[in-house]
Amino acid sequence: MMRAGAVALACGLALSLAAGAAAPACNLVPGWTAQGKVRSYTQDNLFEYMDGNAEGYLLYGFQTMQGVTCEKGGATLVIDISDFGDADSAYGMFSATHDPGQPVVKIGMSGQIVPRRALLVKGKYYAEIAANPEGDYSSTLHEWIAAIEKTLEGSSDPPATVAWFPAEKQRSLRLVPESVLGIGLLKRGYVAQYDAGKAFVVEEESVASATALMGKLRARFAGSSPAAVADEGFQAADQYLGKLCVFRKGKYVAGYGNLADGQDGIALATALAARIH
Amino acid sequence: MNRESSRRNFLAAGLVLPAVASASRTSGPSPQEAAPLRPSAPAFQYRTLGKTGLKVTSLGFGCMITSDGSVITRAADLGITYFDTARSYSGGNNERMVGAALKGKRDRITLSTKTGGRTKQEALDHIDKSLSELGTDHVDIWYLHGKGKPEEVTDDLIEAQQIAKKAGKIRFAGVSTHSGQKELLPWLAKNPNIDVILTTYNFTMEPFMNDVIAEAAQAGKGIVCMKVMAGGTRGRGASPVISEKLHRDGALTSALKWVLRNRQIATTIPSMTDMDQLDANLKAMTQPFGSTDEKILAMHLEHITPFYCRLCGECAGQCRQGLPVQDVLRFATYAEGYGQFALGRERYLELHPSHVQAKCGDCPSCTVNCPYGVKVAREMARAQEMFA
């Protein structure tokens, strides 16, 4: 029996590798059977599965998705595993879709399990499970997420950038795929929301491009004043981004925005700069 | 009528609307009312959202991919009045962000969200969660999300909308659709329970879209349009080079202007992620669609036409060998577009054996005429060679 299960699992994995993305198999967890065929989607037809929501996936570099619906005793699990091309993008998708108000689970790079929904990110893969009908499926979802995690290849270490943001009073941390802080010049980067203010880190291609970006940002925020932070910095005030402190360290452009009165932008930025390496 | 010329006519003169549709409106799109908020603000066009009577700016805001609430806040401050989100966007995080961004402005904006709930109870659970996340006691429009066929708009879901309406949680009921408009919009036009229709609409679409939109508007439905930039700089085939070119040529604002000139449409909800996009769209809103825009869009259409299979299904049944053209082109895209050769070949080999063995080169000429101008014979032959 165990051998048959192992063979089935191996077949499932072989299929997943052949298809270029990890295909879930219902027999990963005993007692569950497949309801219907494996679903496959690419950038071209993801909208057939999730309509307008597809754009959110594409923004994070979605490549392919394979999914299956499993059932057991009247309960169904809709399981989808997406390939985002690289670990940073997959983690970015997770960072945007998990509920920052709920705890995360230390599995793979990260995971989250709530009564009817589970998320997992590992390597370039992002897995989602939705449970039906109404009920608390937490223990089932734990079991499934643990099983799926074992089938996924790739790193279990979150992107290094994540650790650069101070954890204290951090409400959320996410990868913004375009227009960080709503500024088109800041193309892609991480943003952490704090009880007061938000921090960001954008990686440019080179020191030269980061330096050029700083020049454009200074020009954008009229009335900015120099700030002695890392390689170069400035402070400014904006109607929507409030009190800002922006700096460059090597090829990274980072800083804080929407700081509250009394918060020392330069001190916060200096501390953030010290963590960037 | 030649399909290609039909499509070009849609682009060039697609808004020569039936006179009766324009003339007989009672509460449909109203004449332009320019109302500058202050000297530095754009002159907004306000239109009436069908029989709801809601006055909305012709440029609305699709919040789905917006990451920073400051862009939404600024849009509201500048005078945009229509904002759209959905329960499912970013796992619910989008509604939370939109709610925070519009805090204190609720009484002067029209707010819509959507439910993908499949049952009455699931949908009703969604609206309660949406209201909580948005920080409001009601939304103005609550859409059933992404319906492609009349049978997907079930009595159960309509009942959920009616219950929510009676409870004061929503003011108006809507349906959003990305596909199947030819059948769905006329059906929705006749459905007395539906107040507003949110549909994909852009310059790349078939001419029938004008007819079904006119029919729905004439029936008093409020028409809201999305995907107005035809995928814009995101999504399939949007390489950085093409994106840059689109921006440079002004194709995105031309596409928006193309939609806005249709007076049957009350508002549009392009996605905006930064202040520059917001400013560009505000500018487009105030400018008429002209011959330069027409040329830009024609060039863009020319560029995407040869390879852009829109999966419309119009080619079904046209091949004399009975080949499923749309499927084969999709499998080729798996392989060529996304480097998933194994997946593409696997799907290809699952076709009927006679289809797998068929060769387009055996036919003297191709009988398949893609309404969008995709070079079907060439693309099919390439797929057959690739997967052989």
Image (tube, coloured by chain):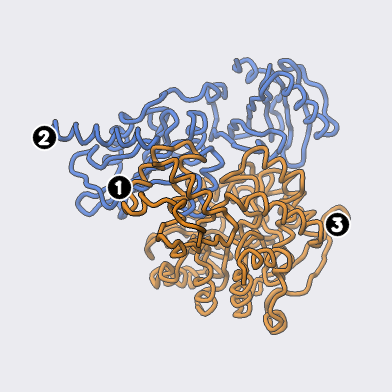
B167 w.r.t. A76: above or below: below
Check the residue under mark 3 and report the chain it is in: B
Q: Amino acid type of disc 1? A: Asp
Give percent across and percent down for residue A136: 30, 47
The residue wearing badge 2 is: A1
Graded by Cα atoms within 10 Å as few (under 14), some (14 to 19) or many (20 or more), the crowding at tag 3 reads few
Disc 3 from disc 1: Cα separation: 53 Å
Q: Position of residue B4 (x, y in %)?
A: 63, 63
Question: Which of marks 2 and 1 precedes in the sequence?
Answer: 2
Chain on which label 2 sits: A
Q: Do marks 1 and 2 share a subunit?
A: yes
Chain in blue (letter): A
Between the residue at mark 3 and the residue at mark 2, the CA separation in whole angstroms equals 76 Å
Residue furthest to the left: A1
At x 74% / y 74%, what residue is drawn?
A: B30
Q: Which mark is residue A200?
A: none
- The numbered disc on residue B38 is 3
Q: Which residue is mark 1?
A: A136
- Give the left or right position of residue A5, taking residue A112 as reference: left
Mark 2: amino acid = Met
Residue A123: % across, % down: 43, 28
